Image (cartoon, rainbow, N blue to C red):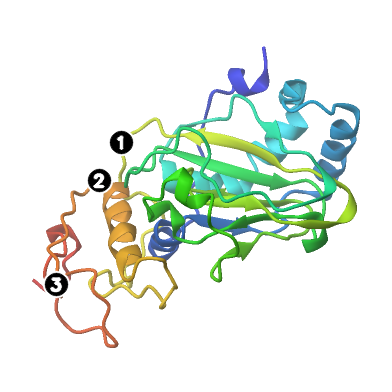
Amino acid sequence: MLNAIRDQFYDCEPTLRDEQILEFCRDGYMFLEGVVDDEVNRRTMDYLAAHTDHMPAEMLEEDWFVDGVFKNPQAAGAVRSLLGRNFKMPKGFCNHRADCPLPAQGWHRDGGSIYTPRLDYLQVFYYPHDVSEALGPTELIPGSHLIHGKANYMGHVRSVKISLSTAAPAGSIFLTVYSIWHRRRKSTASGVRHLIKYNYWRTVPPVRDWVADDEFNLSWPSMNNVPHFEQFKNNIGAVDMFCWLCGEKYEHLGGQAWPCEAPTKLPCDQEGLPKRFHRFD
C-alpha cells in the first residue's frame, strides 16, 4: 500500500498566527525557503533522474520522501493552521519537468478552480534543487485568487508589474490557494527544472484554532498597500476568507465599513466587523 494512502490523514501543531493567516488570505500564497533537508533534496533528485514520467508515484512508497516533504514540520505546521486538524495527505503528485530553455507559459489557473472564500484544500509546490531566474521558476500574481478572470482574458495578459518570482534554493516549498494565477517564467539556461506539485485537503469544519494572538487587532486591518488589479477588493476578499476560516459568516456592508483601511487604528470597532471579533463593545 502506498504511504500516501496508508497515511491518509495527518495532524500536528499549528504554527501560523492570526496576522499570517490574514496575509495568506490576502496574498493567496506563503513561501517557506529551504525548509527541506539537503539529504531529502538529493535523494529526490536522484529518483527523478531515474524516473522521468510526469507522475512517478513509486516515490510515495518511500518514507524518507513522505516524512521529509509531505510531513515537513514547517510546511505541515502551516497546512495544519490553514486546513485544521487531521488534514488529508496528498495521494499523489506531479513533477512539472521543464527542459530549458523555454518561453514563458501563459497565465492560467489550474483545472477545477472555483471562486469561493472557502479554503478546503491547498496546492503546494516543492523545489528539490536550486531554481534560478535562468531556469524559469514559477511566477505568481499575489491576490489573483480573488480575481474573477476568464481564461480567454488571461490569455491576453503578458507581463504583470505586481507578479512574484519564486526563484529559490533547493528545499523550498510554497503553499497556494488553488485558484491563484501562475505560470512558468521564461528560461534562458540549458538544463532541467523540476517542480513537484501536490494537494492537501480539509476534513473538519473551519475553526480559529491556529496560534492565537491576543494583540492582533482585526478591527482596523492593514493590508500594507499591497497592489491589486481591483482597488480595495483584496481587503474584502481577504477578510471574507479569514472569516470563513474562523467559522464566522461575513457580509460586506459597503462604504466606510470593515475592512476599510485607516492610517490610525482607532479605539473602537469598525461598522460591519463581526461581533465575535469586537474588542471595544
Which secondary structure lies at badge 2? loop
Q: Report the residue marked by disc 3.
A: 255
Name the foreground residue: 60 vs 149. Answer: 149
Q: CA distance from mark 2 to mark 3?
A: 24 Å
- Residue type beneath disc 2: Gly
In the depicted view, which residue is nearer to us: 62 or 154?
A: 154
Front of the two marks 2 and 3? 3
Secondary structure at badge 1 equals loop
Task: Judge left or right: residue 126 versus residue 218.
Answer: right
Residue at numbered disc 1: 205
Earlier sequence position, callout 2 versus callout 3 = 2
Give me the residue at 75% from left, 52% from top. Answer: 103
User: Is residue 18 something one can see in this rendering?
Assistant: yes
Q: Residues within 10 Å of mark 1 (few under 14, many from 20)?
A: few
Report if the CB atoms under discs 1 and 2 are less than 8 Å apart.
yes
Numbered tag placed on residue 24 in the rendering: none
* Label 3: element kind: loop
Reading the image, the residue beneath label 2 is: 247
Instruction: Pick whichever of labels 3 and 1 is earlier in the sequence.
Output: 1
Q: CA distance from mark 1 to mark 2?
A: 7 Å
Can you give x and y, in whole percent of width and height, for residue 240 in the image? 27, 55
Q: How many marks?
A: 3
> Looking at numbered disc 1 in the image, what kind of residue is underneath it?
Pro
Is 106 on the left-hand or right-hand side of 122?
right
Q: Amino acid at mark 3?
A: Gly
Residue sitting at the far left = 281
Camera sees residue 131: no
